[in-house]
Amino acid sequence: MVEENIKDINELSPEILDRAALTGIDPQEKERSGTFFQLNNSVICSRSKQEGIEALDLETALKKYDGLKEYYWKAVDPNKDEYTKMVKDAPPKGYFFRSLPGVETIFPLQSCLFMEQKGIIQKVHNIIIAEEGSHLHIITGCTVSPKAQGSMHIGISEFFVKKNASITFTMIHNWAEEVEARPRSVAYVEEGGTFINNYICMRPVKMLQLYPTVHLIGKGARTVGSSVILGKKNSVIDAGFRAILKAEGTSAESIARVVAEDESKIYSRGHMVGEVPNVKAHLECRGLVLSPKAYIYAVPELEAKQVNLEMSHEAAVGKIAEKEILYLMSRGLSEEEATSAIIRGFLKVDLTGLPPKLQAEVKALTEKELKNAL
Amino acid sequence: MEILKIENLWLEVEGKQLLKGLNLVVHEGEKTVLLGPNGSGKSTLLYTLMGFPNYKPKSGKIIFKGQDITNLPMHERVKLGMGLAFQNPPAIRGIKLSEMLQVCRKDISVEETATIAKLLNMEGFLDRDVNLNFSGGEAKRAELLQILAQKPEFVMFDEPDSGVDIENVELIGKQIEAFLSNHSGIVITHQGYILNFIKAARACILYDGNIICSGNPLDILEDIRVRGYEQCVKCNLRKRDE
Ligand SMILES: Nc1ncnc2c1ncn2[C@@H]1O[C@H](COP(=O)(O)OP(=O)(O)OP(=O)(O)O)[C@@H](O)[C@H]1O
Ligand SMILES: [Mg+2]
């Protein structure tokens, strides 16, 4: 298949679409406000179905908006690291999503970043803007075909949440053993704005590294980061969430559930920086280590640079309590069934901020992924 | 018909002799009250019957419905019709009480779930993680609720009344009585107030690894109240009336 000739998501092969469906991508776009699809380094489609919601590919957006000077490389430093530089030096791919002032997505926008070529380095640069008083929901799936051995995904995402606006960003990763992924995300949230970041990853991956950073720059701005991570096989996963509270009345919360199986290594980080008084931050990390060769390193960091702020963390890492297994067994489950029921329960996090339908959809997807994974 | 027969059961846990040649028979349709001081091994006996892996008897036999289940794994015993309401059930994050009821019985309907939850004033708890931050009394009702879902032929209630307020003891006691009117089981209690609602014909005292006495529950409780367990051991009045 020559990807340059594919002009629409519907022209993609069933293998690709099936795989994408596991990360929440619906080619029929039934309950979606629009779609962006990037295959390897080619944009397949980028469109919005809703007035007031823009969904362009970045290249087009840069032309249309005179280089997006206020946004392009304004949240993420292009020289941050070698991976970020690779994106800077490549032709701009990725998406530009924007909700105009006061507009709310009826259904979420969907985006899929798909790799199907052996050894490819997929470079993606996304800019997401919620204008004043608007509300933007995005579900994004990143995945690979089994052909894409030795491939790497680098995704830069720059988020701008304007006054009293909100973005919920739900990202589902579905990688493979030979694949590396290094998303780099930074968000700026203005007064009264909300940025919600949900992250789900339950498949093996060679190396996954992400540490989204949220700057709460306006009064009362708020962020919640939730992640659900199941480490399998030889996965090395380094996942964190950072919030910098720069304005009064801001609040940040990070919730992580991580399970390490087989020989996986998971670094679960959280970092909250309180720069002004009267802010609130909370970090919560719960981890389960399920095999003697698995490893979890939970690193919750709190930095308080003022008096009169409320920052706390909670971290608990351990194995499954024997008593819980016995309890379920006494109700008729075998040991294996009991163990997997407990893991499923453990990884069930109520993702905040999503519209009920999307919430149910993500829940169902998560359940399905878990069923496949356990 | 005997539903349960325990023969010469010896059990050691962590180097402690907890059961020392214990014998006990429960007949079909019978309610047996199990008494005994703290630490005498009552819960231990139930765990052993249920098949907890750390509570494997050294010798002796457990016969359930004519089948030797001494070495049967726990979930097989559940299939045969055994159930246990825990003294101190653990909380499990992410598993709702309603989901536990589905574990207890796969095909339980939404209507039935609602009906039995209502019986125990537990409607508001179905959506909560099982036992997580439940009060003592709520956890006991949640245990009973699971038993009502599971409907085991033979059920063991480990102190369903401890920490439960007077009104709720009545509620729980009556529901246990109703359930046991066509099932068999063992009920452990200390205070005995619940026996005002559960009409059991027989109580046994577990002491030093053995059943040392059995007889009418209210009489035995009165003896314990007046003389204490120590004296019960020495008394030869009722000794093993079976
Ligand atoms: N797994 C274990 N490890 C160590 N000791 C144990 C274990 N299980 C039970 N025991 C001990 O065995 C004894 C009997 O415990 P058990 O819980 O059966 O008592 P009980 O009769 O149910 O008491 P209570 O009335 O307080 O509930 C206690 O001394 C207890 O500490
Ligand atoms: Mg006990």
Image (cartoon, helix red, strand yellow):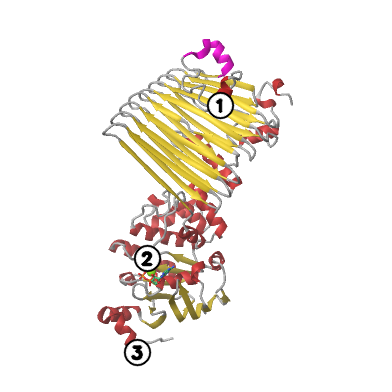
> What type of secondary structure mainly makes up the magenta span?
helix
- The local crowd at label 3, few if under 14, some if 14 to 19, many if 20 or more residues have their Cα within 10 Å, is few
Q: Amino acid at mark 2?
A: Pro
Q: Is residue A48 visible?
A: no
What segment carries the magenta color? Answer: A56-69
Q: Which element is circle 2 on? A: loop
Quarter of the N terminus of chain A within the rendering: top right
Is residue B220 shown left or right of residue A256?
A: left
Q: Callout 3, which amino acid?
A: Asn
- Local SS, label 3: loop
Q: Let me know if marks 1 and 2 both belong to one chain.
A: no
Label 1 neighbour load within 10 Å: few <14, some 14-19, many 20+: few
Mark-to-mark CA distance, 3 and 2: 30 Å
Q: Which residue is mark 3?
A: B236
Q: Earlier in the sequence, mark 3 or mark 2?
A: 2
Q: Circle 1 sits on which residue?
A: A82
Q: Please name the amino acid that badge 1 sits on.
A: Glu
- Tag in front: 1 or 2: 1
Q: Secondary structure at mark 1?
A: helix
Q: Which mark is residue B160?
A: 2
Image-quadrant location for residue A220:
top left
